[in-house]
């Protein structure tokens, strides 16, 4: 298996294009790496409060912890939850 090399372009101080190169149509929480950014809806340019970060897996409830990038609010979602990783932030 190859190494993980995301392609990141910085356009200005506030805009970063993240293109990881995975299939963006069928990504689930369990497919993401730890602390990877994503959105819950297919939004091309999300606001900071629409971006989430994947955290740890909770074995007791069989869910993943996700944290809102702006507010640091934590949620638990099932492993099969569809997410979107190809966006401009």
Image: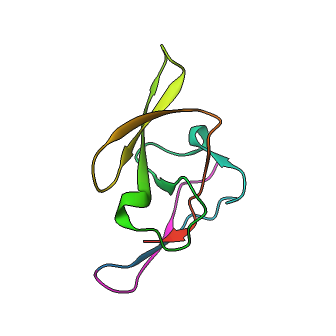
Give the magenta-colored segment's residue range.
1-13
Q: To which quarter of the image does residue 49 belong?
A: bottom left
Q: To which quarter of the image does residue 70 belong?
A: bottom left
From the viewer's perspective, tell me whether residue 74 is left or right of residue 83: left
Q: Residue at x 49, y 17 (%)?
A: 59
Residue at the far bottom in the pictured view: 11
From the viewer's perspective, tell me whether residue 58 is left or right of residue 72: right
Q: Residue 4: horizontal and vertical position, in percent?
A: 53, 55
Q: Residue 60: horizontal and vertical position, in percent?
A: 48, 13
From the viewer's perspective, tell me whether residue 27 is left or right of residue 10: right
- Residue 28 falls within the magenta-colored stretch: no
- Residue 2 falls within the magenta-colored stretch: yes
Residue at the far top in the pictured view: 60
**Residue 85 drawn above or below residue 34:** below
Q: As rendered, which of 37 and 1 lies closer to the eye? A: 37
Colouring convention used in this rendered image of the protein: rainbow
Q: Residue 89: horizontal and vertical position, in percent?
A: 42, 71
Q: Residue at x 61, y 63 (%)?
A: 42
Magenta span: chief secondary structure: loop
Q: Residue at x 42, y 58 (%)?
A: 51
Q: How many numbered circles are shown?
A: 0
**Residue 40 drawn above or below residue 67:** below
Q: As rendered, which of 45 and 33 lies closer to the eye? A: 45
């Amino acid at each position: 298996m190859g190494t993980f090399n995301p392609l990141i372009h910085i356009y200005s101080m506030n805009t970063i294009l993240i293109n990881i190169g995975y299939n963006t149509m069928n990504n689930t929480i369990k497919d993401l790496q730890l602390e990877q950014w994503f959105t819950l809806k297919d939004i091309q340019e999300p606001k900071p409060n629409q971006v989430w970060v994947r955290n740890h897996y909770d074995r007791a409830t069989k869910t993943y912890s996700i944290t809102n990038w702006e507010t640091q609010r934590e949620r638990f979602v099932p492993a099969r939850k569809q997410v979107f990783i190809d966006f401009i932030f």
